């Protein structure tokens, strides 16, 4: 059962490509691979722990203020992640800038708390949180991989396309500027959804 | 237990908020020192960059923090000048061959938040030696480009005074700067407001130092004149014994 909770969000029930949640940050932080990885890691951590915390206090939460309680817990975790990044990964935290703060509003997190953590025990909730974070991360990293490779000719900051290939150095190659701009992230996410739907026929609406 | 009870709800909310506040306050005080250090290192790195130092990639990869600290301690002296009752910060950089550069801190208002930077002038207080900019939250890909080398490298060897000695600062020109003009650099396409913010920031911040520059230049001139006089004087003492001989 735990295995199923873990495997499903990675592909079959992926939060980005199937549920189409958390798109906003997928557009913003995927120009380069490194911030995308850190963002994926941050979301995974926040999601895992917020699921565990909410799940373990789920029977005590007054129903009328449950959304507020969820927000407070998520916000606390996000601020903690932000502070830790500022202390130990300053450059990356500058690149992510406001997007770390915006994890609070990431629909996947609230979605998983409402749909899963409120009705399940802490351990399955933890697995569900991590798995959804990873599912989100896979898409983020895949988008960032293509955007950085074609947009900047590098990966993780290492130049892969030889400098002599570029037109300005007398070569034949030019980076595709469209890959750096946000619309390309949307197009890439669209392509992933297309690929997934052609593999998983049951997702196609009648 | 009835969790929908009003009293229960209020107490629950209060306790939750207090617990969260304690955790956050604790984390913040624990991490503050390291965060401050990061900000401090970044400031020093920017000052060094404005005088074209601190760029040794191997040393940076090895241990960036201590490398930046060491370079800063080696070259840069913080000083402060008082101009019309206002304390202005001035960083003086002395390189190995004795040449001095004067680094002026810049503060301005961008489109979405503050922009800042450092500009260094050569000892004629006119020619720009280097500049560097950063921003809090300008639009990535547009205004945010001010922090890239492609933008700040343009400022090198520009001058802030015209030939008549009037302060003109440096203009950030939309639609292509005239390269033969020593006071113009290219603006960023799509980042006009941020580009203009940089221009305003340069004008306002450097202007505050102009009287100080004038005084410094005058001082240097006087010193040069004095030195010339010294040469004349020493010449006259050289002829004096000859005169005395004649008198005898």
Image (spheres, coloured by chain):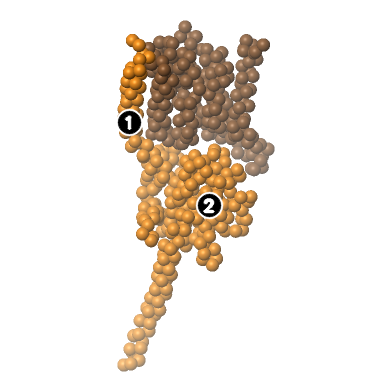
Chain colours: A brown, B orange
Residue at point 59%, 30% (across, down):
A147
Label 1 element class = helix
Residue that appears at 61% across and 55% down:
B179
Front residue of A100/B85: it is B85
Residue at the right extreme of this rendering: A172
Label 2 neighbour load within 10 Å: few <14, some 14-19, many 20+: many
Position in image of residue B141 (x %, y %)? 57, 39
Residue A45: x and y in percent read 43, 22
> Which residue position holds label 1?
B25
- Side of B66 where A13 appears, left or right: right
Residue B87, located in which quarter of the rendered image?
bottom left
Query: Residue at horizontal 36%, vertical 87%?
Result: B242
x, y percent for residue B158? 54, 57
- Nearer the N terminus, badge 1 or badge 2? 1
Q: Place residue A65 in its image quadrant.
A: top left
* Residue at the top extreme of this rendering: A1
- Between the C-alphas of marks 1 and 2, the distance is 40 Å
Q: Position of residue A66 (x, y in %)?
A: 42, 18
Q: Which residue is mark 2?
A: B199
Q: Quadrant of residue A171?
A: top right
Q: Nearer the viewer, residue B41 or A103?
A: A103
Residue A98 left/right relative to A12: left
Residue drawn at the location 51% of the way across and 52% of the way down:
B200
Crowd tier of the residue under label 1, counting other residues whose Cα lies within 10 Å: few below 14, some 14–19, many 20 or above: few
Question: Is residue B220 in sight in this rendering?
Answer: no
User: Which quadrant, please, contains the N terminus of chain B?
Assistant: top left
Q: Secondary structure at mark 2?
A: helix
Mark 1 touches mark 2? (CB < 8 Å): no
The chain containing the residue under callout 2 comes to B
Chain bearing mark 1: B
């Amino acid at each position: 059962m735990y295995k199923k909770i873990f495997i499903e969000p990675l592909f079959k029930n992926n939060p980005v490509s199937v549920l189409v949640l958390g798109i906003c940050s997928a557009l913003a932080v995927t120009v380069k691979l490194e911030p995308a990885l850190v963002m994926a890691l941050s979301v995974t951590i926040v999601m895992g722990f917020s699921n565990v915390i909410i799940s373990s206090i789920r029977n005590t939460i007054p129903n009328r203020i449950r959304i507020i309680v969820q927000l407070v817990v998520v916000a606390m975790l996000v601020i903690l992640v932000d502070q830790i990044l500022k202390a130990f990964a300053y450059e990356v935290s500058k690149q992510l800038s406001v997007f770390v703060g915006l994890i609070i509003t990431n629909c996947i997190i609230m979605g998983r708390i409402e749909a899963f953590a409120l009705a399940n025990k802490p351990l399955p909730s933890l697995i569900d949180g991590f798995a959804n974070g990873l599912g989100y991360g896979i898409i983020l990293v895949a988008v960032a991989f293509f955007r950085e490779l074609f947009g900047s000719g590098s990966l993780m900051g290492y130049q892969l396309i030889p400098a002599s290939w570029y037109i300005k150095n007398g070569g034949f190659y030019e980076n595709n500027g469209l890959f750096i701009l946000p619309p390309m992230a949307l197009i890439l996410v669209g392509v992933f959804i297309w690929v997934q739907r052609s593999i998983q026929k049951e997702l196609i609406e009648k | 237990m009835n969790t929908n009870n009003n009293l229960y709800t209020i107490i629950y909310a209060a306790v939750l908020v207090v617990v969260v506040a304690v955790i956050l306050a604790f984390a913040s005080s624990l991490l503050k020192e390291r965060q401050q250090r990061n900000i401090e290192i970044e400031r020093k790195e920017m000052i060094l960059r404005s005088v074209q130092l601190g760029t040794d990639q191997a040393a940076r990869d090895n241990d960036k923090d201590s490398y930046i600290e060491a370079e800063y301690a080696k070259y840069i002296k913080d000083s402060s000048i008082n101009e019309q009752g206002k304390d202005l910060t001035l960083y003086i950089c002395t390189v190995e061959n004795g040449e001095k550069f004067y680094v002026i801190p810049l503060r301005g208002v961008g489109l979405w938040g503050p922009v800042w930077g450092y500009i260094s002038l050569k000892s004629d207080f006119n020619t720009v030696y280097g500049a560097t900019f950063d921003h809090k939250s300008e639009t990535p890909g547009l205004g945010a480009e001010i922090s890239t080398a492609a933008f700040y490298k343009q400022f090198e060897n520009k001058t802030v005074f015209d030939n008549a000695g009037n302060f003109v600062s440096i203009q950030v020109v939309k639609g292509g700067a005239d390269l033969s003009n020593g006071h113009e650099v290219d603006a960023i396409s799509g980042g006009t407001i941020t580009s203009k913010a940089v221009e305003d920031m340069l004008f306002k911040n450097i202007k505050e130092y102009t009287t100080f520059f004038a005084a410094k230049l005058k001082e240097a001139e006087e010193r040069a004149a004095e030195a010339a006089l010294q040469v004349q004087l020493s010449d006259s003492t050289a002829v004096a014994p000859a005169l005395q001989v004649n008198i005898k």
